[in-house]
Image: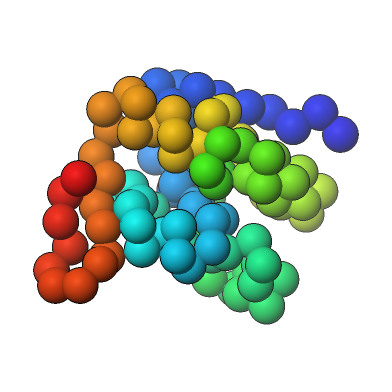
Amino acid sequence: MNVPAVTVSEVPAGATLLDVREDDEWVAGHAPEAVHVPMSAFLERIDQVPDGPLAVVCRVGGRSAQVTAYLRNQGRDAVNVTGGMLAWEAAGRPVVSDGPGPAQVV
């Protein structure tokens, strides 16, 4: 299956950013509006994936491409974010950390 992909600047308006990285990656820094459902627990937590269009992100785009393919096979409207969170940060998009203390904008 050819997985549709968008760049960080092409993430569709109104799409939920679905972060499928693992917990340690999420805590280190994520987009403030993202929903976190790690790929390793995806099937067990699929009920936490919001309805509507999804832009799926991981660190560089490999895991998110796999999740995007799965979601599309289930009939969901999903696109992969090319370059993942590395591209997100490089584009100057906001990132917050869930480390000790209140969330900090990085």
* Closer to us: 101 or 34: 101
Rendering coords of residue 7 (x, y %): 50, 23
Position of 106 relative to 6 (above/below): below
Q: Residue furthest right?
A: 1
Rendering coords of residue 91 (x, y %): 33, 24
Residue 6: quadrant of the picture:
top right
Position of 83 relative to 16 (above/below): above
Residue 85: quadrant of the picture:
top left
- Identify the residue at image location x=53%, y=71%: 48
Colour mapping: rainbow
Position of 38 relative to 16 (above/below): below
* Closer to us: 63 or 11: 63
Rendering coords of residue 102 (x, y %): 13, 68
- Is residue 92 found left or right of 79 in the rendered image? left
- Is residue 81 found left or right of 96 in the rendered image? right
- Is residue 41 found left or right of 27 in the rendered image? right
- Identify the residue at image location x=41%, y=59%: 26
Position of 91 relative to 85 (above/below): above
- Identify the residue at image location x=74%, y=32%: 3
